[in-house]
Image: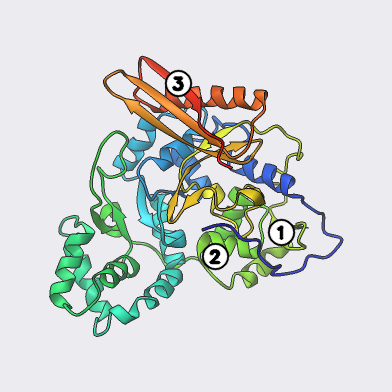
Amino acid sequence: MAPQTPQPSRTATSTAPLLIPRALNRATLARQHLLRRTAALTPKDAVAHLVGLQAQNVKPPYFALWARLEGFRPEDLSALIEARELVRIVTMRSTIHLHTADDALTLRPLVQAARDRELKMFRGGLQGVDLDRLAATVRALVEERPYTMKEIRDVLLEEWPDASPQALSIAARCVLPLVQVTPRGLWGRGGQVALTTAEHWLGRTPGPVPAPDGTVLRYLAAFGPASVKDMQTWAGLTRLSEVFERLRPGLVTFRDENGVELFDLPDAPRPDPDTPAPPRFLPEFDNLLLSHADRTRVIPAEYWGRAWKGNQAFRTLLVDGFLAGVWRFEEDAKTKSATLTVQPFGTLGRAARDEVVAEGERLLADMTGATTSYDVRFGDVIG
């Protein structure tokens, strides 16, 4: 999962303004509301603006919004999920995202081509499986009541005993827009993953597959300036060059240090590269670190791969806008205390350490159940 610097998909003209990594960093942080928290967006509006939040695990969307919204309360996001205004569904990059109901019904059809490509990778384990019949079987099951994936797989294996169990699971989530039902995803409440269709859960059917133009513009608003390959990495789609060309008259262009052409909205914020960026504690799998082909705008080259171990992502710390370490926290219900441990990738100066401690104490106060004490500690530097 380590980021790689892509080869230019299109060489920008030498007259296009140059954006150095620090300029790209500040522009992207501004779009992500990570330069300064905003009080102007509700949690639902923020999820819409960010075009969804990565949500393989339950807590990351809560910590992602805490880092971005002033006065954020986990209970407010949880209430939106319980009211079915937000849902957890596989969309971009074949991963679970938290989306607004409207986006769940439009983005999933938009990225269906990527799900179809994913399914082809498992065709060897689906010999003799009629995918239309599989979809009808799964739909009938999960619209009667939510099923776990194991329950779905067991029923499908009765129908196709020679098929690969893993391939059947992949097929079920690729051919149907399955959402995770509550209590899964609610703050402070447990619940195994149980699934039904987006149409059944939301009480309405998706419209036609939308043109990608509007999603490209939304991506730029949340992650720009960006290249065609950046957008394709975020969405898991291919052949978006013609869409950018169609939109070019309404966009502005830049070039990065590798000569890659970057597109942007004319009025989008592009702060001065020297704009201060306070420390931010981000959850595992935060989209800021996953949504570009070239991630050097956030991840220094010497730290590539440090935020991952196998397929598992660590919670990450930004200092001066760039990846600078990882963190974890533990709560003790008996003593009503919480501890946040920071492991930096390099030596932090006194001022930076003080800012990290202040931000960490705020996180513990807002996002844990600790009512007696909390502490921010520094672990060993990860060299």
Q: Nearer the viewer, residue 164 or 103?
A: 164
Check disc 3 and give the amino acid type: Asp
Are there few (<14), some (14-19), or many (20+) residues within 10 Å of tag 1? many
Question: Is residue 204 something that shows in the picture?
Answer: no
SS for dot 1: strand
Check disc 1 and give the amino acid type: Leu
Image position of 222 with respect to 280: above or below: below
Question: Is residue 106 something that shows in the picture?
Answer: yes
Image position of 227 with respect to 369: above or below: below
Q: Indicate the position of residue 277 as horizontal and vertical percent values.
A: 66, 34
Image position of 188 with respect to 158: above or below: above
**Residue, x 75% and y 40% (percent of image)?**
273
Q: Indicate the position of residue 238 as horizontal and vertical percent values.
A: 55, 71
The answer to which of marks 1 and 3 sits earlier in the sequence is 1
Where is residue 158, by image quadrant? bottom left
Numbered disc in front, either 2 or 3: 3
- Measure how far apart labels 1 and 3 are at the Cα level: 42 Å
- Measure how far apart labels 2 and 3 are at the Cα level: 46 Å
Check disc 2 and give the amino acid type: Pro
- Residue 383 vs residue 314: left or right? right
Residue denoted by label 2: 212
Residue denoted by label 3: 375
- Residue 358 vs residue 122: left or right? right
Q: Indicate the position of residue 138 as horizontal and vertical percent values.
A: 21, 67
- Measure how far apart labels 2 and 1 are at the Cα level: 18 Å
